[in-house]
Image (tube, rainbow, N blue to C red):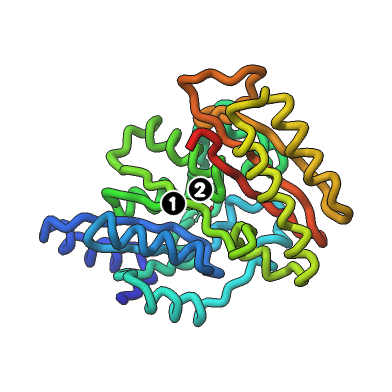
């Protein structure tokens, strides 16, 4: 695996790859890699000829400077994990390399996608995400980009950016990886005790219940069922449970047979904010 710290060295390398008519797949990450990320790298290896993974803790997507400071950076372990997969290139830039102008302006009209659900709780977050992903897309010029379904709203936001900017990049949405009990893998799970992990299973249970009853119940009934499952678990605090149309993430009163739906959930366990989702039509 080749490691590059500067944009120019990465570009120079990728130019030769493109001259050889090889396709490139980008997997953008903020590090603290786990099996979920590695599944993206494996998918990338199957989609294109060369897999580029970036590790960059992007300051512009954090609302709280303390969160940015506390963000785990287990670099040695990340590199070892990537070396055990099909990753060809690791891009590991500094903040100065990605943001030479600290006052750089960026705004993309993301419509409602920016302000609902995660956007409501993390103002400016998706502007920061699109700002860095656009920089990485421009730099790497990938044919494919792999993103995890786990951050469903992020995937929809990135797809919207691809559409707005008319980029020729195919977004590959990779399935959520769960542990054997159903808990969606996340770097945040490290902060849960064994008991907390047990309690956190209500998130995936609520989603599974919505999926199992999708064909036979109304949206209101499905939402009630999901919320009840979470609220029945002591020490788990529900932030939201919603059934939405996948593209817009808008809640609708009725289900339409030509549309696709996703159940979204966020809840707190032991001071850890957990996020999960499930596609309902599949
Ligand atoms: O999902 C993440 O880890 C980040 O939001 C991303 C896409 C790498 C952008 O910083």
Q: Tag 1's secondary structure?
A: strand
Q: Which residue is depicted at the point 45% across and 33% down?
A: 160
Q: State the mark number for residue 149.
A: 2
- Is residue 87 at all visible to an observer of this figure? yes
**Left or right: where 220 falls relative to 103:** right
Q: Position of residue 214 (x, y in %)?
A: 60, 31
Q: Position of residue 67 (x, y in %)?
A: 70, 60
Which residue is tagged 1?
174
Question: With respect to residue 200, does 242 lie above or below?
Answer: above
* Quadrant (top left, top right, bottom left, bottom right) of the N terminus: bottom left
Going from N to C along the chain, the mark reached first, 2 or 1, is: 2
Category of crowding for the residue at label 1, using alpha-carbon neighbours closer than 10 angstroms: few (below 14), some (14–19), many (at least 20): some
Q: Which residue is depicted at the point 44% across and 81% down?
A: 80
Q: Nearer the viewer, residue 64 or 8?
A: 64
Category of crowding for the residue at label 2, using alpha-carbon neighbours closer than 10 angstroms: few (below 14), some (14–19), many (at least 20): many
Disc 2 vs disc 1: Cβ atoms closer than 8 Å?
A: yes
**Left or right: where 260 falls relative to 11:** right
**Left or right: where 54 falls relative to 275:** left
Q: Position of residue 242 (x, y in %)?
A: 68, 34
Residue most extreme to the front: 216
Q: Determine the CA span between mark 2 and mark 1.
A: 6 Å
Q: Quadrant of residue 182?
A: bottom right
Q: Which residue is depicted at the point 64% across and 53% down?
A: 62
Q: Position of residue 93 (x, y in %)?
A: 44, 67
Q: Nearer the viewer, residue 39 or 74?
A: 39
- Is residue 109 at all visible to an observer of this figure? no
Does mark 1 have its CB less than 8 Å from ligand 1? no
Residue most extreme to the left: 20
């Amino acid at each position: 695996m080749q490691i590059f710290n500067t944009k120019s060295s990465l570009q120079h390398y990728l130019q030769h790859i493109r001259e050889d008519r090889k396709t490139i797949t980008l997997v953008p990450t903020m590090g603290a890699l786990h099996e979920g990320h590695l599944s993206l790298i494996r998918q990338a290896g199957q989609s294109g000829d060369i897999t580029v993974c970036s590790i960059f803790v992007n300051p512009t997507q954090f609302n709280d400077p303390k969160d940015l400071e506390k963000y785990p950076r287990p670099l040695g372990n990340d590199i070892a994990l990537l070396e055990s997969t099909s990753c060809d290139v690791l891009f590991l830039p500094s903040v100065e390399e990605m943001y030479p102008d600290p006052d750089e302006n960026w705004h993309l009209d993301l419509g409602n996608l920016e302000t609902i659900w995660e956007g409501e709780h993390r103002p400016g977050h998706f502007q920061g995400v699109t700002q860095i992903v656009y920089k990485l897309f421009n730099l790497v010029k990938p044919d494919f980009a792999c993103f995890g379904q786990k951050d469903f709203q992020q995937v929809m936001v990135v797809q919207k950016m691809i559409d707005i900017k008319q980029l020729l990049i195919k977004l590959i949405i990779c399935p959520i990886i769960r542990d054997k009990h159903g808990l969606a893998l996340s770097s945040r799970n490290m902060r849960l005790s064994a008991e907390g992990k047990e309690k956190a299973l209500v998130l995936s249970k609520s989603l599974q219940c919505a999926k199992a009853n999708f064909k036979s119940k109304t949206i209101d009934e499905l939402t009630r069922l999901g919320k009840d499952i979470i609220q029945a678990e002591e020490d788990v605090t529900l932030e939201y449970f919603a059934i939405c149309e996948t593209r817009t993430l808008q809640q609708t009163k009725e289900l339409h047979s030509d549309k696709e739906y996703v159940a979204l959930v966020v809840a707190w366990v032991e001071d850890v904010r957990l996020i999960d989702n499930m596609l309902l039509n599949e």
